[in-house]
Image (spheres, rainbow, N blue to C red):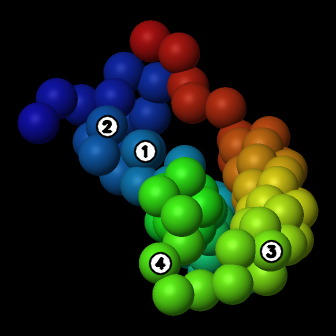
Amino acid sequence: MGRDPRAPGRSRLASNRKIVDAMNAKLKPILLILGLLAAALIVTQLVMGLLIVKGGGSIDLTKLIKAHQHSGYLTVTVVLLYIGTSLSAIVATPARPRG
């Protein structure tokens, strides 16, 4: 491992670890939960959409359409929260040293 020319005695790995550790520890679990929830909602939207297109099987189609609509609103809300939180976490981390 090469030495960091800006910080004598420190390796580049130690310098990069500080940047990664600088992320707010409270945001990490929030981002993980929002990301997993967004992924689950997107898959649910896909499945409900396919059921609607195929005729819904034994499920009442009007209820399925309403559930798909409301689930879509929730998906958009969660994804926008995830994007906003992710962007705020990125902005809050210190810039990487150039070199």
Which circle, 4 or 2, is nearer the viewer? Answer: 4
Q: Earlier in the sequence, mark 4 or mark 1?
A: 1
Marking on residue 62:
3
Find numbered disc 2 in the image and state the secondary structure of the residue it sits on: helix
Find numbered disc 4 in the image and state the secondary structure of the residue it sits on: loop
Crowd rating for badge 2 (residues with CA inside 10 Å; few <14, some 14–19, many 20+): some
Marks 3/1: CA–CA distance: 57 Å
Q: Report which quarter residue 68 is drawn in.
A: bottom right
Q: Is residue 88 positioned above or below 62 on the image? A: above
Q: Which residue is mark 1?
A: 15
How far across and down, in percent of the image, does residue 41 sit? 62, 69
Q: Report which quarter residue 32 is drawn in.
A: bottom right
Marks 3/2: CA–CA distance: 59 Å
Marking on residue 12:
2
- The reply to whether dot 1 and dot 2 touch (C-beta < 8 Å) is yes
Marks 4/2: CA–CA distance: 58 Å
Crowd rating for badge 1 (residues with CA inside 10 Å; few <14, some 14–19, many 20+): some
Marks 1/2: CA–CA distance: 5 Å
Which residue lies at the image location 70% right of the left edge and 74% below the top edge? 61
Q: Amino acid at mark 1?
A: Ser
Residue 4 in the figure: left or right of residue 42: left
Marks 3/4: CA–CA distance: 12 Å
Find numbered disc 3 in the image and state the secondary structure of the residue it sits on: helix
Between 86 and 24, the one nearer to me in the picture:
86
Q: Which residue is mark 4?
A: 57
Q: Earlier in the sequence, mark 3 or mark 2?
A: 2
Q: Amino acid at mark 3?
A: Thr
Q: Amino acid at mark 2?
A: Arg
How far across and down, in percent of the image, does residue 44 sit? 55, 70
